[in-house]
Structure formats: C-alpha cells, structure tokens
Amino acid sequence: MQNFTTMDKTALKEEYSKLSAVYADYKAQGLSLNMARGKPGAAQLSISNDMLNVLTDEADFVTPDCPDVRNYGNLDGIDCAKQLFADILGVDKKNVFVGGNSSLNMMFDTIACMMEQGNSGEKPWNQQGKIKFLCPAPGYDRHFGVTQYFGIESVVVPMTENGPDMDIVEQLVSSDPTIKGIWCVPKYSNPQGITYSDETVRRFAALKPAAKDFRIMWDNAYIIHDINGTPDTLLNIFDEVKKTGNEDMVLEFCSTSKITFPGAGVAAMAASENNLALVKKRYNFQTIGYDKLNMLRHVMYFKNLDGVLAHMQKHRAVLEPRFNSVLETLENELGGLGIACWTKPNGGYFVSLDVMEGCAKRVVALCKEAGVILTGAGATYPYGNDPKDSNIRLAPTYPPVEELKKAMAILCICVKMAAIEQLTK
C-alpha cells in the first residue's frame, strides 16, 4: 500500500471508510483481549510446576548454613540461594541479599531506606528538601511510580539505541547535587528491548556525581530472558565500578518472577558491603527472614546456573513464536506506510510501538472500543506525560496465540484509522 503521508485526502478518506467497516465487524464480536501488562502466559507458568514437588522429606529442609529452612532466621537468605543469584548476576556471593518474591518490593524498600536513613554519610533524602531522580524514557511506569510516591521529582532522560543519553546523564549528575539517582533496565529495557552498550555501562560506572549519595537503581529484570538465537550481551557493571572506585553507587536487582512463578518467585539484590549493611539495618526491623522454603525449592529444582539457562530455553520456545507473530503483523500491516515504527528486541517482554505524533491516545481508545486492552498511552513516561503522544507498549506474552493475532490485527487497523484522522484534519 502507498505511504499514507503521500496520499491525498480523498484517497485517505476512502481508505478510512474501508477500515471503519472492518473495525465495526470486530466491535460487533464483543471481544475481550488483553495486552496491557507483561505477564507470563499459562503455558509459561506450567513450565515450572515440577518445582513444587522437590521438597519431599525432613532431610530436604537442612542446608549447611540453616538447620531448618522452615524456621526463622537467615535475614539475607540461605547461602545456596545467594550462590545461585551470584552466578546469575556475575557477582560475589557476599554481595547478594536474597529476599521475598518481588524485586519491585526490594526497590521500593531501598528507596524508603535512603529516604529515612540516608547513605554515604549524608542526611536522609527526606531531610534534604526537593530532590530528583533521572528517568530514562520510554521506561518502566512502576519505577517512576515508586519515586513519585515518595515525592521525588522525575527528570526525563531520552533513550537512545545504546541506552540512556549519557551526555545528558553525565551533565545533570555532575552538576546538580539534588539529583539522587537514576532508574535503569540495562538489558532488554522496558518497553524498547534495548540493551545498554559497553560504552554506556562504562560511562555509568565512571560517573562523578555532585551528590555523594547518588545511586544507580540497576533493575536487571531480563538478564537471561532471551527470545531468539541472537541474544544481546550486557557488560557487568560491578566489574566496571571496581575499576572506578564507585562500588557504592550501584544497586542491582533481579528475580525469578518471569522464570518460575510471578506470584511465588524469589528476588535478590546485589550491592556493595556498605549498601548491604545499610539495607540490612532496615530489614532487621522489617522481617525475621524471608521464605527460605521457596529459596531452597528453587535451588533444588535448578541445581545451578546451567539448570536455570536450560529452563529459560523452554520459555523461549513459548515466547519466540509470539514475538515473531507481533513483528510480522506490524511489518505486513504497517510497514512502508510512514505512520509507525517499532523495536525488534532479542529478549525481554515487550515491543515498543511509536505511532504518528499525537495519535497514541486515540489508538488506545479505538482499541478499547473494539475490545483490545493496551497499556495506557503515556504510561512509559513519568507522570503519564508522553510529550509526543506516540509511544505504545505492546505485551505479547500473556494472551493465547490466536487471541494475540486477532488483537494485533485490530491494533493495526486502529493505528491506520488514527493516522488518517490526523492527516485529514
């Protein structure tokens, strides 16, 4: 089909009439299709069911550092779980804290800790007046929500194909002591699926913040979540900060939420000894210990890193066809029309779609009317404010394949209709 931006208004209106008829047919079907959030689908959840049966007798409940995992204790997790996460993250076991089922919970608590206790000899953040956090965007809405909850101002940093725009990051961080941190999803970023380049990671490690208590929140949620045969590689930031003397600047997070069960996974944090001492001071009052049965269940099921990686290949078998279907539909339906572009990630959970400027909210509304629920337009920016009203996060993982195909067909119709409305004003 001809590029929409080169068509005259008469031809565009004729095309709109055809699209409207197809759209009306879909609306009449009373569909309910959900692509709003990056949740594993039922087929993925079933992959881990056998893990529920690995603890079978009394002897299973004993580990070298814990006489009975069913009881209290081991605030920072059992050693075998620390070792498994250390291997996943490429860090020393002594730098790992294993917690509950949610890495987001650990990130929230870490920000709360900085707010109430401070770090690096500085006053607690809540005693320093107005403070700010850098937010690469498009980005993860829940990250932005955490710092906004505490009244921290969000400052947008544009994303590039290599990660956050480091020229801007370096300039802001080095010149403004009220900037206390930055949110990062360094591998297969949410929503674009971008992996930070080696240069970007090295520049992060070499930052010279004006604020001594500046922290990088390194949410490595998709560290082993590849979806095809050409996976990205990410430089280990802890190796790099050792070279620059910035070990205290980074806190790294991950979990098994999209490896085993989102509702019953295990989360972990990697940090310097100084940072771990700070957060343990808080956790010591917050809990007597997290779910060690679940930690041990994961270790016994996977055994080691190789076991985890083999398990992730089962996820890939489920996800790769779904992502391929989404990308093929976008190319077949929108390619060459001049009204949209999208990312083609090698892993993670999302595809980022950019429609014509000023059209994202309209696309989402049209989809909703036809029974397709998407993440709200603007959600990938702090305060829900996408200045171009163009970005839409697509989550291909949860719907069954046939529903996904139908949802994508409707989405593409809505993108075309919204574009034509914009072009014929």
Image: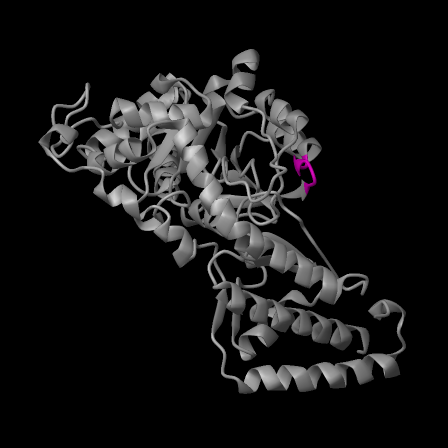
Image height check: is 370 above or below 4? Answer: below
**The quadrant where residue 91 appears:** top left
Work out which residue is located at the far left of the displayed protein and give it.
Answer: 58
> In the rendered structure, does residue 161 fall within the stretch colored magenta?
yes
Q: Which residues are magenta?
A: 160-165
* Residue for point 73% across, 64% down: 332
Image height check: is 269 above or below 30? Answer: above
**The quadrant where residue 330 appears:** bottom right
Q: Is residue 227 visible to the viewer in this orientation of the structure? A: yes
Residue 345 x %, y % = 63, 46
Q: Is residue 389 visible to the viewer in this orientation of the structure? A: no
**The quadrant where residue 26 appears:** bottom right
In this rendering, position of residue 425 left or right of residue 377: right
Image height check: is 269 above or below 38? Answer: above
Rendered-image quadrant of the C terminus: bottom right
In this rendering, position of residue 3 left or right of residue 101: right
Q: Which is nearer the eye, 71 or 41?
A: 41
> In the rendered structure, does residue 225 fall within the stretch colored magenta?
no
Image height check: is 243 above or below 214? Answer: above
* Residue for point 61% across, 86% down: 25
Rendered-image quadrant of the N terminus: bottom right
* Residue for point 39% across, 38% down: 255
Q: Which is nearer the eye, 343 or 279?
A: 343
Residue 408 x %, y % = 61, 67
Residue 40 x %, y % = 43, 53
